[in-house]
Amino acid sequence: MYPVDLHMHTVASTHAYSTLHDYIAEAKRKGIKLFAITDHGPDMADAPHYWHFVNMRIWPPPGRRGGDPARY
């Protein structure tokens, strides 16, 4: 069996309580090899504000991907 979780929401969906970094740490701890973030899109009632999606395209800055977000 391959340990996966293909339906998880982050705090961006407004009804979840974990961040992407929380999920990464927990996946490593549990040995999960693959997971999918399935946050709600901009047209859904509890979706994040439009700027959340704009910022997803520019954050983290180019050349800084994969590191500790506190460093940015």
Image (spheres, rainbow, N blue to C red):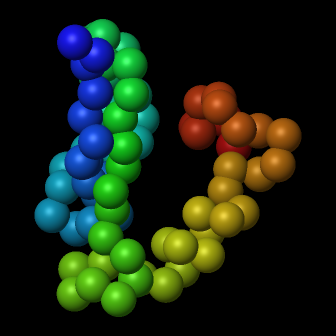
Residue at 30 percent of width and 10 percent of height = 31
Residue at the image position 59 percent from the left and 39 percent from the top: 69
Residue at 50% across, 72% down: 52
Q: Residue furthest left?
A: 15
Q: Is residue 13 left or right of residue 35?
A: left
- In front of the other: 40 or 18: 40
Left or right, residue 72 beside residue 13:
right
Residue 15 image offset from top left, x and y in percent: 15, 64
Q: Say which quarter of the image contains residue 25.
A: top left
Judge whether residue 8 can be spotted in this image: yes
Left or right of 39, for residue 66: right
Q: Is residue 29 left or right of residue 56?
A: left
Q: Position of residue 33 (x, y in %)?
A: 38, 19
> With respect to residue 66, does 7 lie above or below?
below
Q: Nearer the viewer, residue 22 or 39?
A: 39
* Residue under the point 33% across and 56% down: 38
Quadrant position of the N terminus in the picture: top left
x then y, percent, for residue 27: 32, 22
